[in-house]
Image (cartoon, helix red, strand yellow):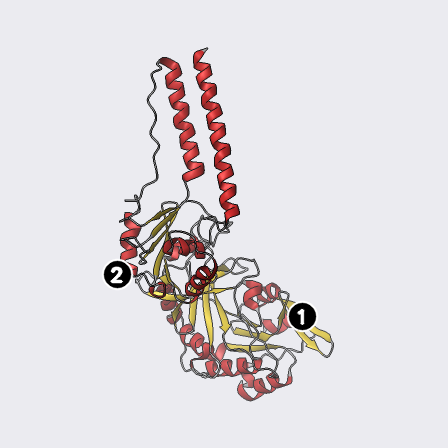
Amino acid sequence: MCKRLRCPVIPSRESGLTQIARRCLLVALLAFYSAAGFAQSVVCREDGIAGMDEPAIRAKRVIGEGKTSDVSRMKVYVTAYGGSLYLHSNFVTHGADNPTKIKLDETGTDLLKLAQNLVFAALPYGAESDRFTTEFIDKVEFDVEPSLFADARFGTLDFSGARNVKVIGNDHHLRPARLIGSNEGHPRWVVRYDEGLYASASVADVGDLKARLEGAPLDSSRIMVLPLLRERATEDAITSDIPKSSVIDFDLSSADALTATLAANTGQTIIALGHIEDYAFVVREGNGVRFSIGLKELRMKVEAAGATLFMLGCHSAAYDGFGVIGEPNSVDAVHRIAAALRLSSPNHLTFLKTLAGGSVAEAPMDLVVDDLVQRSDGTERTNVMVEFVRAVESGGPARTWGSVRFSIPTVATPPLPCTSIDCWPPSDDTEYFHIGVGFVIMGAVLYGIIRFVKNLGRT
């Protein structure tokens, strides 16, 4: 088993209080020195790491017990356990007999450097490093426990760059995950648990989330479209595809007028379709702004009217942590809404999957059902993020779209923490030099203290 090095205490001929004091001080200093200098990760190519038996067993169940020395077939199990980050691979480094494991006690690394330590006995440079980086991005599979994303110390481990990341569900299924942006500056991972349907990677039981969506009926006759735009092609599509009885006629005169309009739609599900800028729906006409309303203000108005809001606007994922990534086609958005409205006896799941492209194959997009959020009245609801994955053709109609929210039962989950990421192990000779200087200084201080204790004992 791989264990942290232990330093023996040298016997002394002295006796009495001086010997006891010196030994206590030496033990304390050695412990401090060890913690400061040698408490970094254990990179293990033996049978296992001491104290990591439980995650090692779990890792073998997930990635299997097979071995490989081919990076393109490399799998890595990743979890947080006992206050440490644990990585267990199936990769056998040249000259070793066992796959490499890592136990990391400090925050402050990225996945690429950890993967380099799993593969190489010494960090690669030049062409070898470039070649490995390419394989790391495209081929190495990382199988991650969902609890890692909610871990207070390692929840923000930098997975960016790795494309083959999967999250382990409570049902032991491995589900593909992807990284999405956030206006808070903390990109987050979402995991796919059905075609076109995603959830936050920190949700342990996404299967339960899917069941709740499927068990929540949706009355299509109570779904209304609120156009917050002035764009001819999109307006024509609404006129031709959406029944007039399903469109809210709002003249874009003022926010107060919108309040009155919404009051007449109590109990309805309102799909707001438009262009989002700086946390607001903005309606442009000519060179000026005809109407604008903040996303939070709109949500509060809709909820005050006793209705449910679906917000569909470009880049809403970046603005509010849910919604669209990119700028898809607004006319296509109308076609999707129309297809979803034509469903007979839909539930939230079928409605979402139709909106995502189940019947509009020419323009697939993904929906992300997010964690718990709070309504303005304090009750709970679930976010639904809509992500379009097709690029918009140049010269096409106006591009708008965004996100969806459904009022369905949900359960609380812890928020993602914010953890600073440093860098271990050293990536170049400069970092090695800095660490070496630190050790020299610490050694000098230790030597001075020991000499002081000796002189003290002689007096």
Q: Is residue 459 left or right of residue 401?
A: left
- Residue 174 location in percent, x, y? 34, 65
Considering every residue shown, the one lying at the far right of the view is 287
Q: Amino acid at mark 2?
A: Gly
Q: Is residue 99 left or right of residue 108?
A: left
Image quarter hosting the N terminus: top left
Q: In terms of depth relative to the viewer, which is nearer, 193 or 77?
A: 77
Q: Amino acid at mark 1?
A: Ser
Q: Are circles 2 and 1 on residues that touch, CB within 8 Å?
A: no
Q: In terms of depth relative to the viewer, which is nearer, 197 or 344?
A: 197
Specify whether residue 107 is in view: yes
As measured in the structure, the alpha-carbon distance from the residue carrying label 2 to the one carrying label 1 is 59 Å
- Residue 245 location in percent, x, y? 55, 83
Q: Residue 257: name its quadrant.
A: bottom right
Q: Is residue 103 above or below residue 61?
A: above
Question: Of circles 2 and 1, which is in front?
Answer: 2
Tag count: 2
Q: Earlier in the sequence, mark 2 or mark 1?
A: 2
Q: Residue 232: name its quadrant.
A: bottom right
- Residue 222 location in percent, x, y? 49, 77
Residue drawn at 55 percent across, 77 percent down: 328
Specify whether residue 304 is in view: no
- Residue 293 location in percent, x, y? 65, 68
Q: Is residue 327 left or right of residue 33?
A: right
Q: Which residue is mark 1?
A: 292
Q: Which residue is mark 2?
A: 66
Residue drawn at 35 percent across, 15 percent down: 14
Residue 57 - label: none
Q: Is residue 218 above or below residue 188?
A: below
Residue at disc 2, secondary structure: loop
